[in-house]
Image (tube, helix red, strand yellow):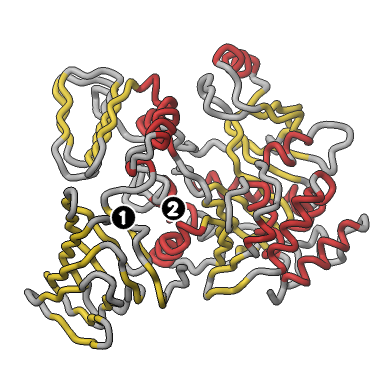
Amino acid sequence: MNGATDSEELASDMDGGGFPEHASEACRRLVPVILAGGSGTRLWPVSRGQFPKQLIGVVAHDSLLQATVTRMKDFTGDFDVDARPIIVCGEEHRFTTAEQARASGVEANIIVEPARRDTAPALTLAALEAVKDGQDAIMVAMPADHSIPDIPALHQAISLAAGYARRGMIATLGIPPTRPDTAFGYIRIGDASDDGSRVIERFVEKPAAELAAQYVASGNYWWNSGIFIVRASVWLKTVARLNGEMHRGCVAALKGAKIDGQFIRPSPSVFDRVPSDSIDYAVMEHMGVESAPCAGVVIPLVAGWSDLGSWDAVWEAMQKDPSGNVASGRVIFEGATSSYARSEGGRLVACVGTTNVIVVETDDAVLVADRSRAQDVKGLVARIHAQRAPEAETHRKVRRPWGFYDSIEHGERFQVKRIVVSPGASLSLQMHHHRAEHWVVVSGTALVTRGEEQFLLSENESAYIPLGVKHRLQNPGKVQLEIIEVQSGSYLGEDDIVRFEDTYGRS
């Protein structure tokens, strides 16, 4: 990759003990870095493995990812914000991530992780990309799945944090706690500076309930927001000192990356060997000790922040009716109090006399939970995984780079799908060993490849694809193509696809 060598040289220079001349306090360039590799299992059944919570409109119409990629727009102060943020996401989410960013008016550089290695390697890849031109940058690293309503307050905190980062410190945003909560990590804070910032004394992982209550009562602990502001050069130097194997692996993986449009694809064989670790464990827990590689500072953030880590947190973040209820979609409350109900699949959800209850309905699953047990949904999803049930990973409606399909009916030897193909998009040239397909065009125009022939289908026209025949479905028009597909055969799984050509580089 062109620039990976520059990154490697910069990292090597820092390993030698100093900072390059361009990594000085004059650094004014801010690069938003969005960490979008989470799974969000506690928001099941809306969040699934193949469509996690950052891609969902949890508290608004736009997804959490879309809210995050636009969060640094209109930033003011003594800094220049890069128009192209860096997004780090997984292979399975790259097309939806790119599509949602574009829909928000943002063109991003997207680093596609070949495997999940937690947040520390993800931020290290982003830092290497940020300095590929040989110039340093201040990274504003943000999880893609948080809610922050008060953007001016966020910008003010980031501006203060960036001032410290420019001087070579690692800054993070801390949330003054409003209650004891076992779902968050905590930061023990030191004395206050005139600007309200605090020295980081130490990071503490999620505590038990009694200890969390002691932390909040003491006034010496803030919640860890997971938002970090740090110069890319400082981050790389710190990781190199604390975990040389991680640093070397990320440098080598990015050096061997392939560029696929806006996607930067690190070498899978190299990245697979990179140690997995979080930012907190790998770096931040070393802050506050005498041997710390650099100083850490925490800036207070009072902006309505929520990590939306459970349905109870979603209820907490949203506007409530006079009885404390929150409704999303087709919901009716009768004599209910302090309840959250969400209808995703369009069916009416009616709650009568419920108190502190969560009800979430989708096309293929319904969750009913006590709000006080909302964190236990993660364990429930683990059980669903153990049973190999598809509801853990996929929705009935499955998004693909060319559009989506919705499995509307199935039986022992048949399955019916509604397939929607975006204008100009194309499915792969493929064939199946175990099923035949019958396509009926509902709207739009289809260009069908079947064996050696190619032909157009209009509304109310159909085509039959025999088992074992190469075929492709394309939308040559300027409006969506919608078809009904009837599959029949002895096996109807999605893994019965042999691809010969694919516009999107899928194997």
Residue picked out by circle 2: 67
State the image coordinates of residue 453 (x, y, percent, origin top left).
Answer: 23, 88
Label 1 amino acid? Answer: Gly
Residue at 11%, 75% (x, y): give it. Answer: 462
For the residues labelled 1 and 2, the Cα–Cα distance comes to: 35 Å
Residue 265 can be seen, yes or no: yes
State the image coordinates of residue 262 (x, y, percent, origin top left).
Answer: 53, 72
- The mark that comes first in sequence, 1 or 2, is 2
Secondary structure at numbered mark 2: helix
Give the left or right position of residue 361, taking residue 5 as reference.
left
Secondary structure at numbered mark 1: loop
State the image coordinates of residue 469 (x, y, percent, origin top left).
Answer: 27, 76
Say if 412 sits above or below 129 in the image. Answer: above
Give the left or right position of residue 32, taking residue 166 as reference.
left
Q: Quadrant of the N terminus?
A: bottom right
> Foreground residue, 380 or 210?
380
